[in-house]
Amino acid sequence: MCTERPARRGVTYATPLGAVVLLLAACNGTTSYMDATGTAGRHEATLGWWLTAVSCVVVAFVSVAVLLGIARHRNDPQRGDPGVMTRRDVRSGLSWIYVGVAVSIVILAISFGGTLVTLNAASRPRITPSLTIDVTGHQWWWEVTYSQTDNPELGFTTANEVHLPVGEPVRVRLHSADVIHSFWLPQIAGKMDVIPGQVNETWLEARTAGDSRGMCGEYCGLQHSMMALDVRAESPQAFKRWADERRASAKPPTTPTARSGRVVFVRSCGVCHAVAGSDALGRMAPDLTHIASRTTIGAGALTNTPAHLAEWIRNAPGVKEGARMPAMPLTDAELRDVIAYLETLH
Ligand code: CUA
């Protein structure tokens, strides 16, 4: 749930109260499901707050009742031997149990009703989505395809990023290329399992614009925690601009360095990676057609800077242990050229 590392490191040295404060602070980041900005997420967060409040009231009430009972009867002269229950004790105790059971039934029935209403609201969008995204979980990254079949005006593939037009429900079809993952954009909606050999469907709707972080919610191997998605909810106009940019093929490089970088890229990287408009057609690894416009690389492993790209290309398993991308044996000049090329892919 809360995976921010600095907070965890702080916990080691903190008092228990400090630990709670630090953990709560971490939960205020862009992964907090209690700070929901999606339609389903808001319904779920409201139910969560309601159940938390009811639980607190019940615990407080029961604690006070127990303490009052102890205080009242401790020095009761009619009480007699504390080990023996009198007829009077049994009668007054039973009436408390009747009241307690009745109150519990009412509270549980209201909570059950609230849960049903929430489940119903979170199960399907109010209107049929006009946009479909196919998301495929890989160890350890996400392939994201805005479907051409369902969205004739769209049709492109990206990786580790999901953009959503605010106020428009989006259908999501989930596929797995290997093991069970779980697709989770905590601020937008609850989790949905991603299962090999099966297509699970869910839906997303952002209610307010903003950036957040998605993640894999089911342990799927060594780099389960490093399987992040950048999530951006934006106005329908901004979404359309982004989609138009994503759909376009990469522009041919203009500088000699970038041109030579493209040759190296196609030869060394093109078996696994694709760049639309080039001869790199690989589908095993993230599509890099617009890599320069993404904020992170390696599914959240590093911020997307030239230095980090160099580090990643030189030795991806050294950065993200277990990553399928091998360390690339490029010369310094080749590496410089490839990065110059990748930096042109906006
Ligand atoms: Cu994929 Cu955990």
Image: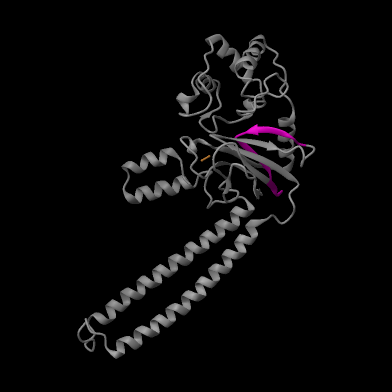
Q: Residue furthest left?
A: 81
Locate residue 75, reporting x and y percent.
Answer: 22, 82
235 left or right, relative to 14: right
Colouring: one colour
In magenta stretch: residue 64: no
**What are the residue bounds of the magenta stretch?**
154-171
Locate residue 304, reporting x and y percent.
Answer: 56, 27
In magenta stretch: residue 157: yes
195 left or right, relative to 16: right
**Residue 276, image quadrant:** top right
Task: Residue at 74% x, 40% y: name it.
Answer: 237
Quadrant the C terminus occupies: top right
Task: Residue at 74% x, 31% y: name it.
Answer: 247
Q: Residue furthest front?
A: 197
Locate residue 248, reporting x and y percent.
Answer: 74, 28
Number of numbered discs overlaid on the protein picture: 0
Q: Main secondary structure of the magenta part?
A: strand
Q: Is residue 260 above or below residue 40?
A: above
Locate residue 97, reporting x and y percent.
Answer: 40, 80
Q: Is residue 161 above or below residue 113?
A: above
Task: Residue at 64% x, 59% y: name it.
Answer: 121
Q: Is residue 111 above or below residue 293?
A: below
